Amino acid sequence: MVYKVLFALVMLVILTPGISHSQWGGSNHKDNIDCSVASLTLTDAATEYSYTFPRTTGNLAVKGRTSAAFQYCWTSAGSGTTYVTVPAGSQWYLESLNLRHKRITYFQSATAGLVLEIEYCTHDKQ
């Protein structure tokens, strides 16, 4: 429980629009942070769907709107074989990213109609 509360507070700071990198413990470089929310519906079970994160994505979090597991991977046709499973009721998050070369993420679920809630922050280094 303490971990969930601490994570929520950390994500609140990280995902607050307009906050600079130095305000959340970063270096002397100032970043303009913009956060966005999107959704991706996995209409059919066991079918791969892709989502392209902006090149400047720094942090991301993905969870199922309902309690169903989903899988993700970084290569096409890999989500059925070379993937990571996010258990039902959990979320996947990454911080301090540099997605210059890996912007497309592939998702699938054994549950048809699963809606993934996607939250990400981008930065524009000044």
Image (spheres, grey):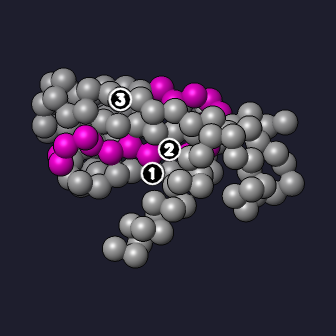
Q: Earlier in the sequence, mark 3 or mark 1?
A: 3
The magenta region covers 52-68
For image coordinates 57% across by 28% down, the residue present is 54
Placement of 66 over or under 2, stated as above or below: above
For the residues bearing labels 1 and 2, Cβ distance under 8 angstroms:
yes
Q: Position of residue 28 (x, y in %)?
A: 86, 54
Mark nearest the camera among 3 and 1 is 3
Q: Amino acid at mark 3?
A: Ser
The answer to whether residue 75 is visible is: no
Q: What amino acid is found at the position of numbered circle 2 in the picture?
A: Leu
**Quarter holding the C terminus?**
top right
Q: Which residue is mark 1?
A: 93
Mark 2 Cα shell of 10 Å, populated few (<14), some (14-19), many (≥20)? many
**Residue 76, image quadrant:** top left
Q: Which image quarter: residue 109?
A: top left
Quadrant housing the N terminus: bottom left
Query: Who's the residue at 23% across and 54% down the image?
Result: 89
Residue at the (48%, 26%) spot, across then down: 52
Residue that mark 3 sits on: 39
Q: Secondary structure at mark 2?
A: strand
* Left or right of 81, for residue 19: right
Name the spot of residue 74 as percent of width and height, x first: 43, 37
Disc number at residue 48? none
User: Toward which corner of the image does residue 62 lie, by quadrant?
Assistant: top left
